[in-house]
Amino acid sequence: MDQAREGKLSELRQQLERGGLSRREFLRMATALGVSLAAAEALAGCQQATPPPPPTAVPVAAATNPPAAAPTAAPTAAPTKAPTAAPAPAAAQPKAGYTLLFDPYRCTGCLQCATACAEKWGTKLFPDQTKDTVNLEFSRIRPMRFQYVDVVNSCRYCTLVEWAEGSKDAPCMAVCPQKAIKYVPKGEGEPGFTGNGYMTVDRSLCLGIDACGRCLEVCEQQFGSGISYDPIERKAQICTMCGGDPACVKACPEDGALQFVPLATNGRVHAHVPDAYAELLYRKMFNVRREL
C-alpha cells in the first residue's frame, strides 16, 4: 500500500472516528482506494467507538413532607368607589329678545312644530280634555300649505310706529279693550311657558271671540293672524315663545327650517299675510310670476 493511499485511509479513519463518515461510507471509499473489502472491514471494526457506559443512577433522598405553612390571612380588598355618573347636559337657558325664523327652502310642512305646540298648551290649559288626543287648534304656530310652497304662520310681534300711530304696542295689544294681551317682564311668568319679555294673553280678562275678537280682526286683515282661539273656551291665544325656549323649534326635524334667533332690527316689525308671503316665495324660489 503506497504512501498516498495510506494517508487517504488515515484521513478516512479519522473522519470515521469523529463521526463524519458512516461505516458504510468508509467501506465504500476504502474499497475505491483499492483496499480489499476484508481489509476495509478490519479497519472499520478497529475504529468503532466504545459504547458509552450506562448512566449512573443518582441516589434519591427519601421524600419528606414539607412542613405545613402557617395559614395567612386573605388579602383585604381595597374599597372600590361607586362609578360616578356622567353629568347631565346643561338645560338650555331661555333667551330674551329672540324671534322665530322660518326657512321656506328647508320646511317640509310636516306639522311637527304645530303638534308639539298643541300638545304642550292643550295639556297645560285643558289636561282632562286633551289627555287622549292632540288637537292642532291649540297650536300657536300654523304651517299653511300652498301650491309648491309652505308658509309657517305665527305671531311676529308686530310693533307700531309711535310718532305715526301713537304707540309702540303690537296692533292686537293696542285694540284689546280689556288689555288682556301684555308683555311678561323678565323674571316673571311661568318658566317654559311665559316670561322674558314675550307676550301672553291673560285668559281671565279675555272676552273671547264670541264677545269681542278685535285682536283677531286687526291681525287677520293686516298680518294674516298670529292670533288664534282655543277650541274649548274660545279665548285668544298668542305665541309666547315658550318664555324664551320654544317647543316648536326643538321639535322641528329639519336642520335650520325653524330657528330661534336674535331680533336683528330696531325699526317697525310686522308680518306678511300668508297668501301674499306664499306668492312672494313662489316668485323668489321659482322665478315665476303667478297667482297661487
Image (cartoon, rainbow, N blue to C red):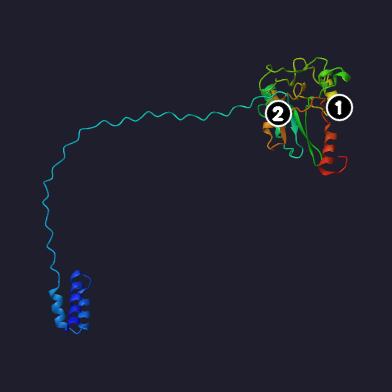
Packing grade of label 1 (10 A; few <14, some 14-19, many >=20) is few
Q: CA distance from mark 1 to mark 2?
A: 24 Å
Packing grade of label 2 (10 A; few <14, some 14-19, many >=20) is many
Q: In the rendered image, which quarter is residue 215 located in?
A: top right
Q: Looking at the picture, how far across and down is residue 271, in whole percent?
A: 82, 29
- Image marks 1 and 2: residues in contact by CB distance under 8 Å: no
Residue 29 seen: yes
- The quadrant the N terminus occupies is bottom left
Q: Is residue 179 above or below residue 292?
A: above
Disc 1 versus disc 2: nearer the observer: 1
Q: Which amino acid type is shown beneath numbered disc 2? A: Cys
State the residue at coordinates (83%, 40%): 284
Q: Looking at the picture, how far across and down is residue 166, in whole percent?
A: 87, 17
Q: How many marks?
A: 2
Q: In the rendered image, which quarter is residue 2 located in?
A: bottom left
Q: Secondary structure at mark 1?
A: helix
Query: To which residue does mark 1 refer?
Result: 222
Query: To which residue does mark 2 refer?
Result: 117
Q: Secondary structure at mark 2?
A: helix
Q: In the rendered image, which quarter is residue 30 located in?
A: bottom left
